[in-house]
Amino acid sequence: MSTDPAALDQWYVLGALQDFAPGVSMRRLLGHDLTVTRASDALSVAWHAGTLCSRTDYGHLWTTLGTPERPVFDLPESRKADRRAVYCGAVTVRASGLRLIENFLDLAHFPYVHTDVLGVEARPEVGQYEVEQRRDVDELWATKCEFFQPRAAASSEGGQMSQYMYRVVSPFNVMLYKTPPTAPSRWDVIALFVQPVDPDLSIAHTYMLVIDDSSTDAELIGFQQMIFLQDKIVLENQRPRLLPLQPGRETPTRADLGSVLYRRWLKEKQLTYGVEAPATLA
Amino acid sequence: MAWIPIALSRDVPEGTTRGVIVEGREYVVWRGASGSAQVWEDRCPHRGMRLSFGFVRGNSLNCLYHGWQYDAESRCRHIPAHPDLVVPSSIRANVYKSVENGGMIWLGASDDNAYLPVLSPRLPLASIAVEAGGDNLPALGERPFGEGAQLLVLERSGLLFYIGWHQVDAARMMLHVALADNADAERGMAALRGLRYELEAEAGHVH
């Protein structure tokens, strides 16, 4: 059970609203067992010590075990009428949620993990991009990211240079903005909301706000699930399963600027949940 | 620590990798075009990905996650995300001492004086998992070959068995088994199943 204030004082997704059946469902967050009760259209969340704060933003149920400094982040694209909101389902992954976020921020794995879909081995280069910690909103941004993708999205008919931006809004919630094949002047939004169940066990909830009037929901969901299952193979086979923050434990390069900033930010927050304990170092 | 057999040579052909767990630690065994087997920590120094999921090209092992390429001396030679980068020589996979002998791949002993006899079995039979510990081996009625190597040589059903073994965790071990002669493999397997039965019974498993 977590007593880590940096982890407790955050908002977490427990699932898409549509996935809670009437009555009581069990969920788990940061090692605590929770109950979610759906009565008519109202959802409530409780744990051993009573009712928890909850919210229903962006089609998901959010809760916190502590006292967050801020409300759930703003996602302006969710209010645009021409965007399709797509819930891509929940996938359980035997790894720290922080590993999931870090993988989401990574461009360099596209040619190897998502071969001939999000990248090709012949074009593996990651160009210089910019990273920034926006202290006013306490968010991390990576901008000016670019990568050649043979099949960037479900609606792709050929390769494209995709533009990416990444936005980390809390230690376990992240989104990316990327060029849609059908509207190169706008951005698709793909969000990854991680529900840390235990330090080394997570549920990934993928949510998209896309500009695509040709693909069916099944095609959009199928595409994202294919991508995520490819990531899952990597995520469950990284060692240690918890994210190491000690310098020298892993070896970042220029392509890992986003990860370097993310790890520094986690240290600054003194987050320990899902982090490798320094005492376990040999 | 003695020399520990961790795989049959036959089961790691050129161009392949194999993940092995020895006493709770994860190792990758792989063989490149040079033909010699390597034993490394099963972990890419970049992001901790298990190298046993990687791919062998020529004489290099490449990590599945980002394609980092390691040569047979374990040095990282190429980082595809930065094709023009001269990779610092400090970036290396973690190598373990190993040797091939008697059709088995052996993880090096921590004791430099541990004696590994030269073996010459003729027929690699199989690697099998057994739910027993090394402390159950004396039940087979044979003494180990020597202190320096985790190996038993014993006779069953008229066949001479070379049995290398390693502990996976407290309750399980792998036996790497070869026969002294080009005997009938089917007879060998039948006798080997008998040995497994003896060991698991000794460890308290009811069949």
Image (tube, coloured by chain):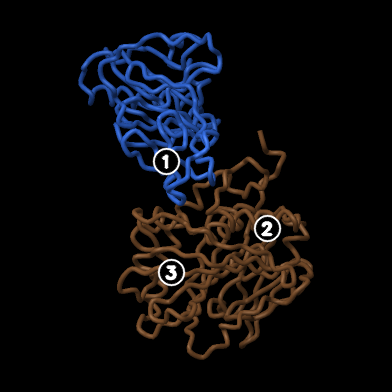
**Along the viewing direction, whichever of A251 and B52 lies nearer the viewer:** A251
When asked about the image quadrant of residue B161, the answer is top left
- On the image, numbered disc 2 is attached to which residue? A31
Q: Nearer the viewer, mark 2 or mark 3?
A: 3
Asked if badges 2 and 3 are on one and the same chain, I answer yes
Vertical arrangement, residue A5 with respect to residue A153, above or below: above
Q: Colour of chain B?
A: blue
Q: Within 10 Å of the Cα at label 3, are there few (<14), some (14-19), or many (20+) other Cα atoms?
A: some
Horizontal arrangement in the rendering, residue B160 relative to residue A241 (left or right): left
- Residue situated in front as seen by the camera: A98 or A94: A98
Please state the chain letter of the residue tagged with numbered disc 2 in the rendered image: A
Q: Quadrant of the N terminus of chain A?
A: bottom right
Quadrant in which the C terminus of chain A is drawn: top right
**Above or below A20: residue B158:** above
A229 or A245: which is nearer to us?
A245
Q: Residue at x 41, y 44 (%)?
A: B53
Per the image, the residue denoted by label 1 is B69
Image quarter for residue A214? Answer: bottom left
Question: Which residue position holds label 3?
Answer: A162
Question: What type is the residue that disc 2 sits on?
Answer: Gly
Residue in the image at 33% along x and 68% along y:
A159
Q: Secondary structure at mark 3?
A: strand
Q: For marks 2 and 3, give the CA distance.
A: 38 Å
Q: Chain of mark 3?
A: A
Circle 3: residue type: Ser
- Around disc 1, counting alpha carbons within 10 Å, would you say few (fewer than 14), some (14 to 19), or many (20 or more)? many
> Against B138, is A117 above or below?
below
How many residues crowd mark 2 within 10 Å: few (<14), some (14–19), many (20+)? some
In the rendered image of this protein, which colour is used for chain A?
brown
Label 1 in the same subunit as label 3: no
Whether discs 2 and 1 lie on one chain: the answer is no
